Image (cartoon, rainbow, N blue to C red):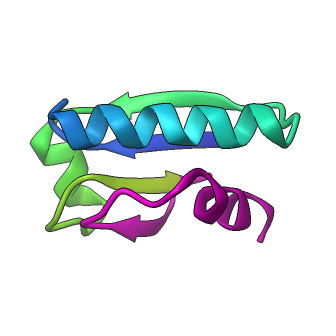
Amino acid sequence: MKIQILGTGCAKCQKLAKHAEAAAQDLHLDYELVKVTDIKEITAFGVMMTPAIAIDGQVKLSGKVPSVDELKRLLTA
């Protein structure tokens, strides 16, 4: 599973990355966490508000930092 954190590296983006990693580890997933910080790459996903998270190339959420439990639901959906 490829988890992409889309954002410029701000505090919210870093928090989202930590939450995503915690959720994936709690679920014992085989995952790769990638931080996408290039604005052109982020907009190529169609994201206008960061932070955002994409799972296997599909944007699942943008503009907020979900809780670890919310992320667990996204990762298992």
Question: What residue sits 80% from the left and 37% below the top?
Answer: 26
The quadrant of the rendering that contains the N terminus is top right
Q: Position of residue 6 (x, y in %)?
A: 31, 45
Comparing 55 with 13, the one in front is 13
Query: Would residue 6 appear left or right of 54 to someone viewing this image?
Result: left
**Residue 30 picture location, percent across and down:** 83, 31
Residue 70 is covered by the magenta coloring? yes
Residue found 59% across the figure and 51% down from its top: 68
Direction from residue 23 to residue 57 in the image, left or right: left
The answer to which quarter of the image holds residue 41 is: top left
- Asked which quadrant contains residue 43, the reply is bottom left
Q: Nearer the viewer, residue 35 or 40?
A: 35
Which residue occupies 11% across, 43% down?
Answer: 39
In the rendered view, does 65 fall on the left or right side of 22? left
**Magenta highlight on residue 24:** no
Q: Work out which residue is located at the far right of the displayed protein and give it.
A: 28
Residue stretch rendered in magenta on the structure: 55-77
Image quadrant containing the C terminus: bottom right
- Residue 46 rendering spot, x and y as whole percentages: 25, 69
Number of callouts: 0
Q: Is 63 displayed left or right of 70 in the figure? A: left
Compared to 27, does 66 lie above or below? below
